[in-house]
Amino acid sequence: MDETSTPETPAPHDGGSGGPERPGITRRGLFGLVGVGTAGLAVGAAAAVGTAAAVDAATAEGDGSGGVHPFYGEHQGGIVTPAQDRLHFAAFDVSSTLDRDGLVGLLQDWSAAAVLLTQGLEIGEGGAVGGSDYAPPSDTGEALGLPAAGLTLTFGFGPTLFTDADGVDRFGIADRRPEALAALPRFQGDALQPAWTGGDLAIQACADNPQVAVHAIRNLSRIAFGRASLRWSQLGFGRTSSTTRAQQTPRNLFGFKDGTANLKAEDTALVEEHVWTGSGDGPAWMTGGSYLVTRKIRMIIENWDRVQLQEQESLVGRTKGEGAPLSGGTEFTEPDFSATGATGEPLMPTASHVRLAHPDQNGGARMLRRGYNFVDGNDELGRLDAGLFFISYQRDPADFIAVQRSLAADGLNEYLRHVGSAVFAVPPGARPGGYVGSGLFA
Amino acid sequence: MSTRPVSFLAVAALASLALTGCVANDTGAEALTVDIVDDACAVSTDTAATGAVTFTATNNGSDVNEFEILADDKLRIVGEKENITPGQTVSLVASLEPGTYYTACKFQQVGAPVGLAEFTVTGEASEVSADRQALEDQAVAEYVAYLRSQVGELIPAVQALVDAYVAGDDETARTLFADARVSYERIEPTAESFGDLDPKIDYREVDAVAEGLDWTGFHRIEKDLWAPEPGDLNSDGTDALADWAPSTPEQRAEYGAQLVDDVAALRELVDADDFAVGLGDISNGAIGLLDEVAAGKITGEEDWWSGTDLTDFAANVQGAGVAFGAVRELAEQDAEGEQLAAEIDAAFDELESGLATYGSIEDGFVNYRELTDADKKALSDQVNALAEPLSQLTSTVLGV
């Protein structure tokens, strides 16, 4: 594990417009993922120096080149990292034959690959085209010539990893399960499908290029064959939240700006308070981690599109154009929940989404949202199978639960179906030479 | 319908190879006798010490016979003597490492082994220092012998199926259908290498239609035996009764004769003196068989009407196992190769035990339609777990 070696010198970048802070590494050139502890780790270690802070220096907006976010650090990437444009999220079930050593081996192999993938490098001996003519290439190759595109890979552990559905402690870690990590309660209006729910392990791949994100999940799935297999996976586009002030507030498929009031990376004190698990929060292995909630939320958009503008705005609680709260001001003006109109009714309607989701209405509960739009073709009725793949990171899933319970009265629910749900413990970032989640097995 | 090419080289030199494990003119060998009759195959003792073991076999039966030594999977042939005519005595000298083997004869050189009996070899494993060429020759000879034996078993199995089908005895024919395909499925990539034979023998209706071919073979018979009801759909969602009608007795005779002829043609090809395989063909054949499983069987499209996909599945896996067994010693030339072989072994074990929960080739499997999506995914995961290391086999075996 601690073995390091000097990597081959990376060749110059051949895609994007390399800035001075970008390492300028191409997918061609660095070979040798032969288990953990080889070339890639040393590169990652160098890249991690001095970049453990919450905010990356890498380019924020998605021009497709995206820059490089180091895999190693105090926290995992892909949380306060400026939200990339594209998502491929994957939930895995581990094989019934996997034992504790096998699970550790998988996390080591995934980490070693992630170090290379996040730098836009090919994985495996020989990479995509440099290996034996008589063996399948180690790297599947569809990202050849593409830059790192800001790829982040974020790994999480589901409740069933600790104790499976039959109550079995497969890996001797049941007593290390954080109390906060438990299957979410049933919420009003849930229409969850098992095929979109749960999972032992999760990988969130975000990048500014969809092919880079897919390449990462495809290769990590391949590495896992025989040890873990895909339970479900979701492609997303058009980030629906901004996670830094530099980013414009994007729109969801309802056509509204989403995430105006989201936690931003710059709010370091708030991020510390609401996103990262602290040293007293639970088991020590989770310190510096977070809890990830995903909800696949189908939007009945054909019905929504027939709703009058005024009704749309009062259901959301914001204007559709500017995104200002209906109590007045501009997008970033705090909503005034006490403001009333001429007839005494609140300007922020009691069933409006913004009102019900607001921290003031939920005992101060806040989370960092990082969702994506999705369109998975259409259903059998000819309706777009579209919606929001909601992702939130919080210090405690209880915050999500509180807000979701408030939203039981949300007027938008008429146009929403929650079809998938999952919760994962996201351990802190891996240290150079280590692997993600190592604290759990220490 | 694998797309992986498996070319069989017509290398004349290979045809003269000594058969697997045979050591010529070894005079110090322990001698055992084999009494061959048409329905029995009695070896004088069921154990021997490791090293060169000589079997002196006499055919006391009424027709030509052959004697085989099989590995512990009862499939891989580690030594054989063919064309033993009535009254003839021959010797077979086999160099056997410690382990469990099976001895058997094959009356008229076709069909299932006769008198299969366990044979134990005891002692210390010898230091194998055989040079690479010898190992390669052995792997090739072993695999060719296996292909020939499987085609030999195919002939009577197909004949029995066709007899019942042509006679209109559908009930019997249905019980014979899955078994008749086993030997074929074990060696499918080989059959596919002979251009037009596989389309005639094993095309599904949708494939034949797509390629504009006359639809013949196993699956034509299958649809007659498990005839669709009005409203049933083909695997591609088209009406099962469109452009299809139950075969008339005359058509049954025609399709039956065609299948018998086609498997006979296959036998002629693999029995030809110039038939040979390359090392890469063997390992690619193993991979190709797993591709067959992953592409056709796991989706239940192969035996759409009979639901006997799991028998094909198991036979594909067995065939892959035999091909792997033939080249494994060549793969295990260094620590990396040994690790690969161990990974492949473990994955084979998992997959075979997964399959065993649904039945066996001997006793039959449950209808594939009874499997849930979760059952199929579990099998698919096991196929992936095996196919991934197996896909490295050719490179490792060839050392390039």
Image (cartoon, coloured by chain):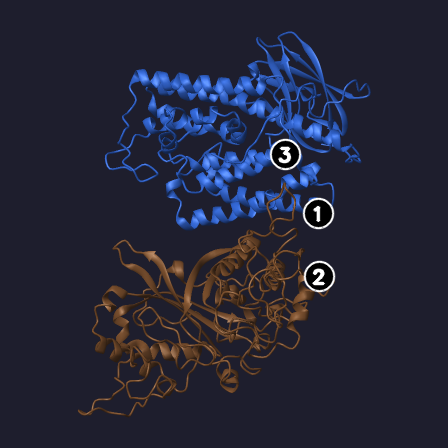
Chain colours: A brown, B blue
Which of the two residues, A404 or A257, is positioned nearer the viewer here?
A: A257
How far apart marks 3 and 2 lie (CA) works out to 35 Å
How far apart marks 2 and 1 lie (CA) works out to 26 Å
Does residue A227 appear in this view?
no
Q: Residue B166: x, y in percent?
A: 35, 18
Q: Residue furthest front?
A: A17
Which of the two residues, A440 or A87, is positioned nearer the viewer here?
A: A87
The residue pinned by badge 1 equals: B336
Q: Residue A112: x, y in percent?
A: 63, 61
> Please, which chain is the residue tagged with disc 3 on?
B
Q: Is residue B54 left or right of residue B223?
A: right
> Please, which chain is the residue tagged with disc 2 on?
A
Where B58 falls versus B306 (above or below)?
A: above
What's the residue type where badge 1 is placed?
A: Glu
Q: Residue A434: x, y in percent?
A: 66, 67
The residue pinned by badge 3 equals: B280
Q: Residue furthest right?
A: B28
Q: Nearer the viewer, mark 1 or mark 3?
A: 3
Q: Residue at x 52, y 60 (%)?
A: A212
Q: Quadrant of the C terminus of chain B?
A: top right
- Same subunit under labels 3 and 2? no
Q: Nearer the viewer, mark 2 or mark 1?
A: 2
Describe the element under mark 1 as helix, strand or loop.
helix
| Mark found first going from the N terminus, 1 or 3 | 3
- Same subunit under labels 1 and 3? yes
The residue pinned by badge 2 equals: A9
